[in-house]
Image (cartoon, rainbow, N blue to C red):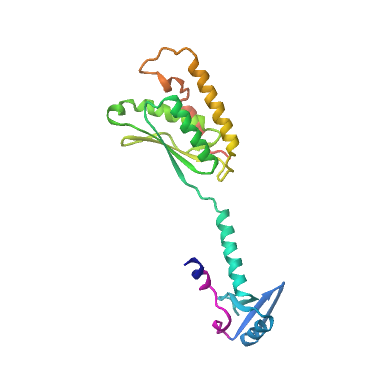
Amino acid sequence: MKNDNIKNQYRVNEQIRVREVRIVGDGESIVVPTRQALDMAREQGVDLVEISPNANPPVCRLIDYSKFLYQQKKRQKEMKAKQVKVEVKEIRFGPQTDEHDYQFKLKHAKEFLEEGNKVRAYVFFRGRSILFKEQGEVLLLRFANDLEEYGKVEGMPSLEGKKMFLYLAPKKAGAQKKSQQARDREAAEAEAKENARQSQPAEAETPANGGLFANAKISADALKKLTETED
C-alpha cells in the first residue's frame, strides 16, 4: 500500500499532458516541449518523471523510474530514522515499596530517560493505604532527586484519585542508549552496595519514618529547584 502511494504521487511519460516542461539535472535546467522531452527520454533509455507539478512549467527529470522510486523510499526511511520518537514510560510504586524494588525501578527510569523518553512515575494507594499519601509523596520526591542528572521534573507530585503522579522529561532527548556492558556494570555496583547495606546491623524503625522513607532526605524546596528550566 505504501509503495502504491509513492507511485501515485508522480506522473510518468505519457501521463504528463502539459504543453512544455522544465528538465533539471546535472546542474542544468532547460524548458522544452513535452513531446521533445519524451523523445529525449526514449533516446537515453530512461523515463520522463514529473517531480514538481505545481511549478510553471512543471519540473521533470530524465531518470529510470524504478531508480527514482528507490531513491524516494530511501530518503523517506532516512527522514523517519532522524525523527526522535518520544514515548511516555510508566513506573509504578506502592506506598510501602522496599529498597530493592525501588533501586530496580530507578535503574529502568534512568534507561528510559537516557533513550529520550518521558517518565510518568506514580504511587498507587490501595484501600486504606491512602492514609500514607505523605509517604508516597516523599518516595516520589526522592525518585526525582535520584534522577536529577537524567531528567527534569515537570511538576510537583499531584494526587489524582488513588494515584499520585510525578512527571519527568529527559534532559537530552534521544540520547544514545548505554551499552549492555555499561548497564551490567552499574547493576553489579548497585547490587554490591545493596548487599553491603543489608550486611550492616538493622536500625530501629518506627511506622512514621521506617523503611524506605527513612532514607528520603529531600524537601519540597529541593524539588522546586529541579523544576527550574535548565539549558
Q: Quadrant of residue 36?
A: bottom right
Name the foreground residue: 186 vs 212. Answer: 186
Highlighted range, magenta: 6-18
Locate residue 230 relative to residue 218 in the image: left or right: right
Horizontal and vertical percent for residue 63? 64, 75
Measured along the vertical axis of the image, is residue 213 above or below residue 184? above
Q: Quadrant of residue 42?
A: bottom right
* Residue name at image x 66 percent, y 80 percent: 45
Is residue 228 in view from this perspective? no
Name the foreground residue: 90 vs 18. Answer: 90
**How many numbered discs sit on the rendered protein?**
0
Q: Is residue 96 magenta?
A: no
Which residue is situated farthest in the left direction here?
127
* Residue name at image x 53 percent, y 32 percent: 148
Which residue is situated farthest in the right direction here?
27
Measured along the vertical axis of the image, is residue 25 above or below residue 199? below
Q: Is residue 7 magenta?
A: yes
Horizontal and vertical percent for residue 50? 59, 76
Horizontal and vertical percent for residue 11? 55, 77
Q: Quadrant of residue 41?
A: bottom right
* Residue name at image x 60 percent, y 74 percent: 65
Q: Main secondary structure of the magenta part?
A: loop
Is residue 48 in view from this perspective? yes
Horizontal and vertical percent for residue 147? 51, 33
Identify the image quadrant of the C terminus. Answer: top right
Locate residue 171 relative to residue 95 in the image: left or right: right
* Residue name at image x 45 percent, y 42 percent: 89
